[in-house]
Image (tube, rainbow, N blue to C red):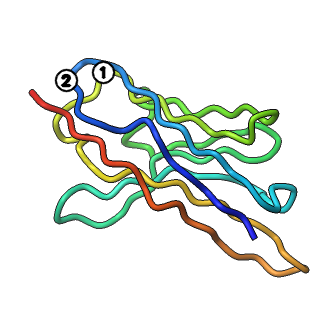
Amino acid sequence: QVQLVESGGGLVQAGESLTLSCVASGSTWTINSIGWYRQPPGNRRELVAVINKDGGSDYNVGMKGRFTISRDNAKNTVYLQIISPKPEDTAVYSCKADVTEAGWGRDYWGRGTQVTVSS
C-alpha cells in the first residue's frame, strides 16, 4: 500500500506563489506516477499536472504555465508550485498515486490540502 500526505496549503494573497508538497510512504517502488488534482467549491475534481517515475510531466492544457510539478525521489515527494495564484485557484488540492501491485493497477489518494486565494 501507499500513503500520501499533502501539505503547504493555506490562505494566500493573489499573486503570492505557493508550493504544495505530497509525501509518499509505504510501497513507494510500486508508484508509476503521481498527479495533482484540485476541486474548487461546487465543482468537479480536475487534473492539474502529473509526473511519472522517470520525471516526465504533463499538464492540464488550461493550466500549463501557471503550475509547475516536480519531484524529489530521495524524499519521495512531489511538489506543485502555483505561480501567481488567482482567486479562481481556490480549491482542495489532492495528490493521487498510480501504482502497480501484483500486476494490478490501482490508485491511492491523499486527503488533500485547502488553498484559498484572496484578491
Q: Quadrant of residue 8?
A: top left
Measured Cα–Cα span from mark 2 to mark 1: 7 Å
Name the quarter where the N terminus is drawn.
Answer: bottom right
Residue 86 located left or right of residue 56: left
* Mark 2 or 1, nearer chain start: 2
Above or below: residue 53 compared with residue 4: above
> In the depicted view, which residue is nearer to us: 1 or 78?
1
Categorize mark 1 by other alpha carbons within 10 Å: few (<14), some (14-19), many (20+). some
x, y percentage for residue 117? 20, 34
- At x 53%, y 60%, the residue is 110
Q: Tell me which amino acid carries mark 2.
A: Ala
Q: Secondary structure at mark 2?
A: loop
> In the depicted view, which residue is nearer to us: 118 or 86?
118
Q: Which residue is mark 1?
A: 84
x, y percentage for residue 17? 35, 20
x, y percentage for residue 36? 51, 49
Residue 17 located left or right of residue 30: left
- At x 29%, y 42%, the residue is 115
Q: Which residue is mark 2?
A: 14
Marks 2 and 1: CB-CB under 8 Å?
Answer: yes
Residue 7 located left or right of residue 118: right
Q: Secondary structure at mark 1?
A: loop
> In the depicted view, which residue is nearer to us: 115 or 105?
115
